Amino acid sequence: MLDGPVKHLSLLIVAVAAAFPWASPGTILGGDASPGPERPNIVLILADDLGYGDLSCYGAKRFQTPHIDRLAAEGLRFTSGYCSASTCTPTRYSLLTGSYAFRRQGTGIAPPNSPLIIPPDTVTLADLLRQAGYATTVIGKWHLGLGETGQGPDWNGELKPGPRELGFDSNFLLPTTNDRVPQVFVENQRVLNLDPQDPLWVGNQKPSDDHPTGISHRHTLKMDWSQGHNGTIHNGISRIGFYTGGNAARFRDEDLADKWVEKSAAWIEAHQEQPFFLFFSSHDLHVPRMPHERFQGATPLGYRSDSILQFDWCVGELMKTLDRLNLAERTLVVLCSDNGPVMDDGYQDDALEKLADHRAAGPFSGGKYSVYEGGTRTPFITRWKGRIAPGASSDEVVCTIDLASSFAALTGVDLPETACLDSFNLLPALLGESGAAGREHLIQQDNGQGGNYGFRVGDWKLLRHDSKQTRNRVVEEPLRNTPVPQFQLFDLAHDPGEQQDVMEQHPQIGERMKTRLAELIAAGRSRPAAN
């Protein structure tokens, strides 16, 4: 977090901003403002497991996503928009910290009882916006851990440190991810509606021999598991991990999206008189896919695509709220995803069986868990009415990791030297300004520190698989590990599907990229330090 003179300056900015909510930081401090006289509201919509080809504005034919299509028509659609990792926790870590997750141990997929993965003294995207006078909140999936290192969450007490120690004024969360226990909401620092007489226990082992699980009571499940998700049963679905108690606090899977839209609309309305930052973190496409009953059967492709329509509805409801409050022209909306698609991710929900000719990753190979393009190249849309020209598309490379630096530039906040080590200011590209350039290079990773990287420089893409295997190479097939060479080189301009390894034809390019990737990893940062 910020301290010393910076923290005192931050308090001054917040105090003045409260009196003059639409004055820019430059106006407050008597300096130049960038990019203009207003600080827009920011609504960041992060999808979960949404593939490049999962929206009709990105080529989906089997179903339509009208609300997101409208967002793209009124804004800017990127064809080279990325997240930094092909699983959720490391992407979320990088989005908030502006630093590649592979630089820190313990940033892989968080277990149910994980402590907070981001150290509380880290400068985050939310810290930067709060410094600029924004009200900040996160609503939806968290999956970055809660509680002290070495202890983890105190489910029956205060769940801290958490989002409020990372720059968010408030939060309404699914604490982990919904295929992991527990199925409860966390509002600010406590489990919502928890009865002290029915305490919540969460663990890695069965609490008793007769505890019902997806193995012992498989016949009772309304959605069967295919692998791994066979612990405690809630709402007819077994999960990863075990828990007991907290019955009054538990939610129905089918109601998640409605609750988050309700909370988001209320929060926007309550904060409409000052600049605000809403991080709307969806869960819809992630397993277990159990959309609300009104969306079940809405498409011919099963619950996965039904969940895409539910996510599209969520986006539409957020846009309706902005329109109703006359905030659309004062709000920058960014829509992106935390990783690419996966079909059978642990439950038998017919995602593969009903896939037909739908290409969830679009023209790309790979998906979730993979450093092929489909794992991290996802839909990426920006809209700011009156500022971003409508209906355009951009081939510039942009990434969720760059939002921290870009939002800091937007609001006139200086980045500390030791913060956001891999985040670049791509604000002109995100706003679609003429001649604005995106990233020159991007490192992609899978889940952890296993040494599997993608490295894009221009149209060249180097794959480095130190494990010599990849997972989910072909999204349209069952999830499996596939042997691959340690190094591969692809020319994305002519081979976006990464089918033809051209390392032998271009050995010098391959060697230069190997060296440069190793240098960037070893350097500990890619954002240049000040001289």
Image: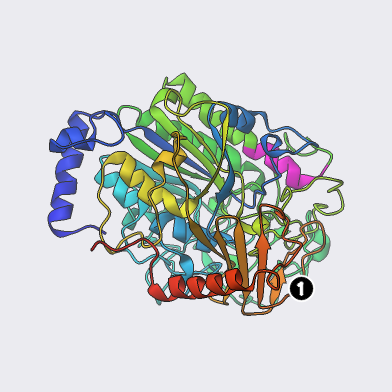
- Residue at image position (60%, 51%) is 48
In the image: residue 27, left or right of residue 88 = left
Q: For the residue carrying disc 1, how many other residues have a C-alpha within 10 Å: few (<14), some (14-19), or many (20+)?
A: few
Q: Position of residue 434 (x, y in %)?
A: 45, 34
**Magenta span contains residue 210:** no
Q: Which residues are magenta?
A: 301-311
| Closer-to-camera residue (282/234) | 282
**Residue highlighted by disc 1:** 482
Amino acid type of the residue that numbered disc 1 sits on in the rendered structure: Thr
- Residue at image position (73%, 75%) is 484
Where, quadrant-wise, is the N terminus in this rendering? bottom left
Where residue 71 sits, quadrant-wise, is top right
Q: Is residue 96 above or below residue 207?
A: above
Q: Is residue 490 above or below residue 134?
A: below
The secondary structure making up most of the magenta span is helix
SS assignment at label 1: strand
- Residue at image position (47%, 52%) is 439
In the image: residue 145, left or right of residue 343 = left
- State the colouring used for the structure image: rainbow
- Residue at image position (57%, 77%) is 450
Where residue 486 sits, quadrant-wise, is bottom right
In the image: residue 144, left or right of residue 124 = right
Q: Position of residue 255 (x, y in %)?
A: 62, 42
